[in-house]
Image (cartoon, grey):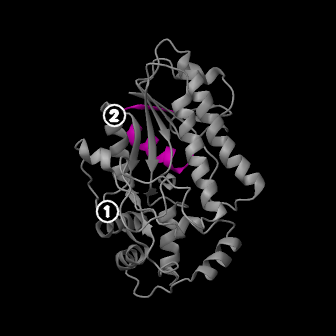
Amino acid sequence: MKIVLSGGSGQVGSVLARAFQREGHEPVILSRHVHPHAPWRTLVWDGVTLGDWVRELDGADAVINLAGRSVDCRYNESNRRAIMESRVLSTRVMGEALAQLDQPPRVWLQSSTATIYAHRYDAPNDELTGILGGTEPDLPDTWRFSIDVANAWEREVDAAPSSSTRRVKLRSAMIMTPDRNGIFDTLVGLVRRGLGGRAGDGRQYVSWIHELDFVRAIYWLIEHELSGAVNLASPNPLPNDDFMRALRQASGVKIGLPATQWMLEIGAWLMRTETELVLKSRRVVPGRLQAEGFEFDYPTWPEASKELIDRWRELR
């Protein structure tokens, strides 16, 4: 297959491109910058306007739009604008491009986020029974912003001009990969320094998906006639306290100092990020994938974290 990955020069795009190329497919990356040493073709796009890159979509088998400014930052006015516009405008121009093709891809997989769901502990959120966020009492402004971004992102997919391309909105949980500078790498760094205890009260749920299951799910969605919102998450989210304990055990670290909310606020300010990434309860499950028969190779965090730790060590 020829698979175009727009905004594909980041970590998730690299994970997918490696997997596609390893299986004999042709990944083509659309990026804001040229990457001359990449092992696959890379073309420049700005994520806003139509250009020569549109020709790469004609006759392709699938397009996966991953474009969006990283949310690992402080949500000041400038960063908020960049986060929102990079997602909305890139999704809009992709829809416009697909509508004008003679041979559009069979499927458009559009990145979204599990953050769209409500902060809750009592029950899991799947695509049919999940509660969308934004109405919770005393919701922090930064959390509301993330939900607004997610909703605006998905509205652009639904509003895209009509074409024969099937559309799937990927409500992804945290993708766990041993690559450098990813979320797993960051968490392992905290654990190894003795700082891998619970965050806040530790009750908030962590939704995650193993890198290999994420890749398999992407393949599955390309091959099966599923459309609309799909949760890409392990079927077993777990409270932060349990999540960190399992990661410490996989890492061979016995002690993990906990961090209170005020400590996290100071740490987030120093690291130029937001506490939402660790304090919001994301209890998300893959209802539609499982209902359609998809099976996870790494459904539980203890076994997933052990496999990831082994590969993390090999890469260092």
Q: Which residues are magenta?
A: 10-29
Q: Which residue is mark 1?
A: 236
Q: Is residue 274 magenta?
A: no
Q: Is residue 145 above or below residue 220?
A: below
Can you name the residue that lies furthest to the right here? 78
**Left or right position of 94 against 192:** right
| Residue ID at (34%, 57%) | 234
Q: Position of residue 37 (x, y in %)?
A: 58, 41
Question: Is most of the magenta stretch helix, strand or loop?
Answer: helix
Residue 56: name its quadrant. top right
| Label number found at residue 226 | 2
Q: Position of residue 159 (x, y in %)?
A: 55, 29
**Left or right position of 273 against 218:** right
The N terminus appears in which quarter of the rendering? Answer: top left
**Left or right position of 277 against 308:** right
Residue 59: name its quadrant. top left
Q: Position of residue 254 (x, y in %)?
A: 39, 87
User: What's the CA distance linking mark 2 and mark 1?
Assistant: 22 Å
